């Protein structure tokens, strides 16, 4: 059993940090390899075939690095490629993020909800099955075209202009917001400034708990007593991305 192998995590950029942050809370002693595919960001406007190919390349790299389990921290990649990856790589477990829409059904069924996600996620078969199964008939699906790019860029003024343009019409009309892209929790404060007080739903904490359970079931938990290591890989070799990633990491 590869208990000492790293947990591989990948996203189309640094947005998956919001997932890593929740995982570290419950698994602080594990070692992590985080792969940011900023060279090919965003995934939301790519075809299924393109996304499968990108994910396959990343998974091959993470397997070469002896990862024992792989977390897909990108909602679009999860929605489009997780089944493909599980069929192709049967020897390694995959844990996939998904928009926390079921949580609205469970905890706030009668309230107005805005689902913020990429176009690729909202149009995916996986999300549509989830949506139609738990639709509260008070939900607006909003494809946030270009928003993940702005967050990746880290331009706060452009982000505020974008949110004011596209979200302000919903101010006072929405009670719940589903953060359907791992980039979006990085600007949760700015979203609330635009919409007013809302209740956020984010799937990352539940993914972290599920990951821990799977590691325990498969006897893959690393029992080292020291805090684990984190390795960051960026497909564009952008030093600024790496610096920003570790700056955010200090906030944990």
Image (cartoon, grey):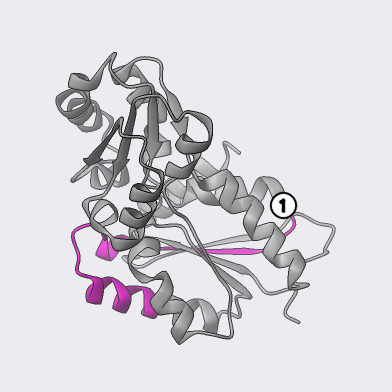
Q: Is residue 56 left or right of residue 220?
A: left
What is the x, y in percent for residue 147? 24, 41
In the image, residue 59 lies at what x, y percent?
45, 77
Observer able to see residue 185: yes
Q: Which residue in the structure is indicated by mark 1? A: 28
Q: Residue at x 52, y 36 (%)?
A: 106
For label 1, the crowd category at 10 Å Cα-Cα, with few meaning under 14, some 14 to 19 and many 20 or more, is some
Quadrant in which residue 200 is drawn: top left
Q: Residue 239: where, in percent of width, then height?
A: 38, 56
Region in magenta:
29-56
At 58% from the left and 80% from the top, the residue drawn is 92
Q: Residue 143's image quarter?
A: top left
Left or right of residue 202: residue 115: left
Counting labels gives 1
Q: Position of residue 48 (x, y in %)?
A: 24, 71
Judging depth in this view, the residue of 194 and 213 nearest the camera is 213
Circle 1 SS class: loop
Q: Is residue 121 left or right of residue 70?
A: left
């Amino acid at each position: 059993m590869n208990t000492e192998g790293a947990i591989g995590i990948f996203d189309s950029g640094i947005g998956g940090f919001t997932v890593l942050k929740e995982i570290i809370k419950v698994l602080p002693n594990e070692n992590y390899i985080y792969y940011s595919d900023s060279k090919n960001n965003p995934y939301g406007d790519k075809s299924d075939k393109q996304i499968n190919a990108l994910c396959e390349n990343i998974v091959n790299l993470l397997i070469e690095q002896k990862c024992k389990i792989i977390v897909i921290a990108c909602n679009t990649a999860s929605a489009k490629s997780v089944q493909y990856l599980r069929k192709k790589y049967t020897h390694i477990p995959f844990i996939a993020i998904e928009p926390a829409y079921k949580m609205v059904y469970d905890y706030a069924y009668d309230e107005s909800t805005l689902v913020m996600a990429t176009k690729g996620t909202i149009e995916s078969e996986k999300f549509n099955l989830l949506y139609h199964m738990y639709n509260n008939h008070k939900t607006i699906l909003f494809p946030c075209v270009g928003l993940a790019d702005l967050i990746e860029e880290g331009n706060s003024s452009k982000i505020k202009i974008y949110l004011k343009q596209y979200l302000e019409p919903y101010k006072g009309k929405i009670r719940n917001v589903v953060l359907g892209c791992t980039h979006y929790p990085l600007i949760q404060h700015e979203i609330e400034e635009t919409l007013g007080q809302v209740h956020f739903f984010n799937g990352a904490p539940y993914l972290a708990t599920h990951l821990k359970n799977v590691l325990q079931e498969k006897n893959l938990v690393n029992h080292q007593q020291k805090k684990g290591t984190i390795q960051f890989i960026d497909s564009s070799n952008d030093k600024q991305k790496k610096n920003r990633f570790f700056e955010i990491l200090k906030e944990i």
